[in-house]
Image (cartoon, rainbow, N blue to C red):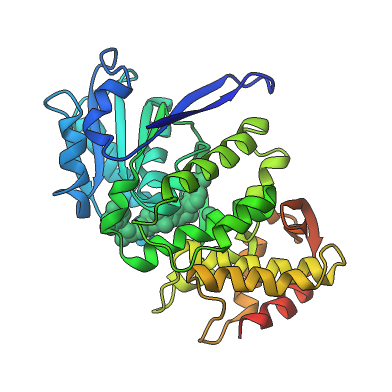
Amino acid sequence: MRTLFVSSAETGVPLRYPIHIGSNLLAKTSELVDLKNFSKIVVVADEKLVNSSLTDLKNGLPKGAAVLKVTGSENEKKLTSVESVWKFFSKNHLDRNSLVFTLGGGALGDMAGFAASTYMRGISYIHVPTTLVSQVDASIGGKVGVNFAGVKNLIGSFHHPHAVIIDPATLKSLPAAEFISGFGEILKHGLIKDAEYFEVGSSMLHPTPDTPQLEELIARSCKIKSDVVCADPFEKGARKLLNFGHTVGHALEALALESEEPLLHGEAVGLGIIVESAISIKKGLLEDKYLEIIISSLKTVGLPTKISSAIDYDAAIEKMLLDKKNRGGSIRCVLLKEIGEAVYDVEVSAEEVKSAMEILH
Ligand SMILES: NC(=O)c1ccc[n+]([C@@H]2O[C@H](COP(=O)([O-])OP(=O)(O)OC[C@H]3O[C@@H](n4cnc5c(N)ncnc54)[C@H](O)[C@@H]3O)[C@@H](O)[C@H]2O)c1
Ligand SMILES: [Zn+2]
């Protein structure tokens, strides 16, 4: 087992919580976290994990923790789900000294974390992420929220977890495409911050949960994400770098949610990375040769690099303009300068985005 700390003293925002990473950790939860000072402990769990990770987690908790089983999916990342969680909290008489465990992927973690962040103006929660996207990215940084009015994460807050417990063994039951989706975030971390990490990630041919370096990859991503978050906890500046691939990616993900053709979060991010890299080249920031390298890295890990159906460019641009990061009629992107170096807040016209998106056909 290894433990990293999300910790920032310098920014004036006191922030410190552990990320524990290791196989078969869930049954040891009470050894990892001091639980005795919490008045009540409850779990919001993905119903798919009832016979596996939930049993392990319950073995690691004091007896009697109530469990709410929910559907953990992007479709359920909405306000009505939050309301069900609030009802569960109040039915179980949670008070400001209570603790909530979220057990599931990024969609459940964002939704239940948001419920915890707003219940009684914010109670403690611990993320126990069970997908690769959530282990390498979503569970760290305190961004919680739900989709609203067709826009990703339109309603949300910053509320950091009390701790994060990552057990890579939980990934074994993930469908292959869901597992590979995590590589969208892993490659993003390398592209914005660490060229050597990008090389490591992009040399992995169709990785699986049995890939030996997996725990090391998770730890490296957690470190990159937590360093960026600590330097800028409320996304006033450099934290925006983590949105690389997401301006276009979130628009594609939101459009897919309204259609019959699903697109996983990391897949959408991968496609967004291609388009935003192409824009970086058009803007003269990135050398041409890198586009092929980036596309081939996505192919190597098994992420899609094309979209087979027609893309409604205008609808995608509309989504980007509605994105909270782009308010004011302009689209702002994170663009690449090098592998491992990115810049944020670059204004890009709708025409530039549309023409770069053609690369996805
Ligand atoms: N808060 C953040 O900083 C942040 C960062 C990245 C992504 N996100 C969000 O995370 C979401 C994507 O998360 P995701 O990729 O984890 O998808 P997800 O949460 O939708 O989960 C994917 C699927 O896997 C299932 N599942 C979860 N764990 C499983 C397991 N161990 N075995 C079998 N099935 C399992 C879920 O039920 C679901 O069907 C998006 O909403 C995205 O916006 C948030
Ligand atoms: Zn993401």
Residue at screen point 67% across, 31% down:
231
How many discs mark residues in the rendered view? 0
Residue at screen point 68% across, 83% down:
358
Quadrant, the C terminus: bottom right
Image quadrant of residue 270?
bottom right
Residue furthest right in the image: 284
Residue furthest top in the image: 37
For residue 65, above or below residue 153: above
Query: Is residue 348 shown to the viewer in this render?
Result: yes
Image quadrant of residue 34?
top left
Q: Is residue 215 left or right of residue 347?
A: left
Q: Is residue 185 left or right of residue 85?
A: right
Residue 147 locus on image (x, y percent) = 46, 55
Image quadrant of residue 35?
top left
Residue 36 locus on image (x, y percent) = 25, 14
Residue at screen point 20% across, 27% down:
61
For residue 350, above or below residue 228: below
Residue at screen point 33% across, 51% down:
80
Quarter holding ligand 1: bottom left
Query: Is residue 243 shown to the viewer in this render?
Result: no
Residue 319 locus on image (x, y percent) = 60, 66
Quadrant, the N terminus: top left
For residue 16, above or below residue 53: above
Query: Observer-nearest residue: 348 or 83?
Result: 348
